[in-house]
Image (tube, rainbow, N blue to C red):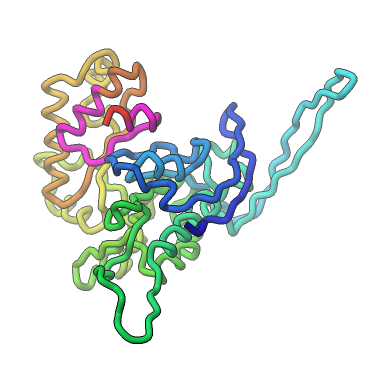
Amino acid sequence: MISVFRPFSSNYGIGDQVGQVSSFSHTIENLTRDTEIKPLHSHNDYWRKQPLFDALSYGCQSVEADIWYFPEKYEVERTLIETTKDGKEKDKLTTSTFENNEIYVGHNQVYLDPSLTLSKLYLDPLYRFLKYSNPGFIYKDKNPVTEDFDSKHGVFYNSPETPLYFWLDFKTDPHETYQGLMPILQPFIDQGFLAHYDTVNDKFIPGPLIITITGNSPVEEIEKETTRYVFIDAPLKLFKSGSPQDELERYSKLSIIASGSMQELIGQESYTSSKTRDLNFNDEKNLEEYFQTAHKYNLKTRIWGGITWPNYLRNSHLKTLWKLGCDLLNVDNLNDASEAF
């Protein structure tokens, strides 16, 4: 199969972890052909050795990237300590330049790397994957096409009708970041790859890629748009009995998924004790109400901020959330979660 992603190589450093993004020549087939799609959200996906590709290879239906946009170009100077051949240490000053026309991916600003952009890590490979899975057919006489191509194909080889949920956590000014984001999404819009909401006809139009903004969300700006190509992360904590119906209806037009932290949904006291026990009856009752209410408004659900250790208890919580109706399970260890589900 022809490669649909040009190889690249880049060093990256996240926190105190330094790694290497190796050269790739991935295709949709070699990533997802023998993989079962799972209701997993690859949390902080950009931390992985192969951002996006690892998640797809494990069958994750959802990925997440923290993004940063700066209106003005700036430079960062770092001092590295090197050891010379004679065993002495010396300082070496390095300079990194961050352009104002790029969106960068990273957890903290201090560890951003100019080479790790949203386009390089995610948008370039996604666009190439989607272009490959949506070919044009050329024929002279009889039409050889036997399948229905009314809808666009996605990135999962064995399930092209399944969309990929792509979350962008805005870490910088919502308006400026949104204005910086939309031009680089335009190729996806032009090709019909983005799911979107038509406010004129009050209709959701499916697509192989569903983008949700979380963090510093430009809610009011997106709400004014006639066609919304990105969605807002709805606050799951609102979806309970007694909440204003008009507010829930509002988010049903702005969102595809409602998410919330475990702590805010079950309360601080129960959250603290749950770190050493299974979720109890009251926890399950509260969580199930949130899930069921969100589902009434056609929203999927995700919970973040759950426990990550010990493994057996983390997996127990995840299985309980799935049983109760949580649609996307927040995971850090893809291998463990894949085996558990």
Q: Does residue 283 sit above or below 76 in this rendering?
A: above
**As drawn, 256 above or below 291:** below
- One can see residue 32 in this view: yes
Q: Is residue 272 magenta?
A: no
Q: Position of residue 315 (x, y in %)?
A: 28, 24
Q: Nearer the viewer, residue 39 or 25?
A: 25
* Residue found farthest to the bottom: 141
Magenta-drawn segment: 316-338
Which secondary structure dominates the residues rendered in magenta?
helix
Residue 338, horizontal then vertical, whole percent: 33, 32
The C terminus - image quarter: top left
Q: Quadrant of residue 136?
A: bottom left
Horizontal relation, residue 285 to residue 119: left or right:
left
Q: In the image shown, does 275 or 143 lie closer to the viewer? A: 143
- At x 20%, y 42%, the residue is 238
**Magenta stretch: residue 325 in it?**
yes
Q: How many marks?
A: 0
Picture residue at 53% right of the left edge, 36% below the top: 49
Question: Which residue is at a point 57% across and 39% down the rendered structure image?
Answer: 109
Q: Is residue 160 left or right of residue 322?
A: right
The residue shown at (25%, 45%) is 258
